[in-house]
Amino acid sequence: MRVTVTNSDGIADFREAGFIYLTIQPSFTTGSVPAQGWGLVVFSGGSTADLVVAAVTEGCDPAQMIVAATNTAGQFITLVPTAPDFVNTAWNAFFVDGMPVGQILFVRCA
């Protein structure tokens, strides 16, 4: 028996029966998000939606959340998950393909 998996870009791969695909829960691999103030964390990588899931898992309310990172020029870029798209333009442009494993972030939840 052959199992074929196709991602959203139309790229397919197959494996013979017995191969297992695992889904990894997005998380902060180092650091934690404090109840008040800013926390320095290392993200497991993935999309902005994955980042929000990781923060919610830590008890963060997306309506109160702000995330900051630095771009290649050393400038801060921010994400406000519940804000209109134009607020997150720099974030979305920089992380157009998602965040790499080991991305360092500053996160504030309240």
Image (tube, helix red, strand yellow):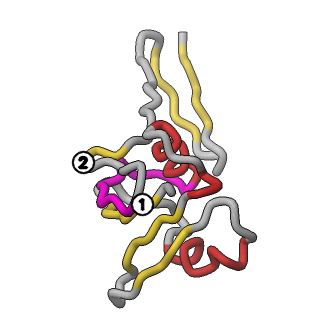
Q: Nearer the viewer, mark 1 or mark 2?
A: 1
The image shows residue 54, relative to residue 41, as above or below, that is: above
Task: Find residue 79 and report its horizontal and vertical position in percent.
Answer: 55, 68
Viewer-proximal residue, 28 or 95?
A: 28
What label sits on residue 35 in the rendered view?
none
Q: Residue at x 28, y 44 (%)?
A: 29
Measure how far apart labels 1 and 2 are at the Cα level.
13 Å
User: Residue furthest toward the left?
Assistant: 30
Disc 2 residue type?
Thr
Left or right: 59 in relation to 81:
left
Left or right: 62 in relation to 36:
right
Task: Find residue 45 and report its horizontal and vertical position in percent.
Answer: 40, 52
Q: Locate the N terminus and report the quarter of the image it occupies.
A: top right
Disc 1, SS: strand
- Asked if residue 62 is among those painted magenta in the image, a careful observer would answer no
Q: Residue at x 33, y 61 (%)?
A: 103
Task: Find residue 26 and report its horizontal and vertical position in percent.
Answer: 44, 41
Query: Dot 2, how many residues are within 10 Å of its Cα: few (below 14), some (14-19), or many (20+)?
Result: few
Left or right: 92 in relation to 70:
right
User: Residue furthest toward the front?
Assistant: 36
Viewer-proximal residue, 59 or 41?
A: 59
Q: Earlier in the sequence, mark 1 or mark 2?
A: 2
Task: Find residue 51 and report its horizontal and vertical position in percent.
Answer: 49, 51
The image shows residue 85, relative to residue 44, as above or below, that is: below
Q: Residue at x 37, y 78 (%)?
A: 70
Q: Which residues are magenta?
A: 37-48
The image shows residue 92, relative to residue 81, as above or below, that is: below
In the rendered image, which residue does mark 2 sit on? Answer: 30
In the rendered image, which residue does mark 1 sit on? Answer: 107
Disc 1 residue type?
Val
Viewer-proximal residue, 76 or 66?
A: 66
> How many numbered marks are there?
2
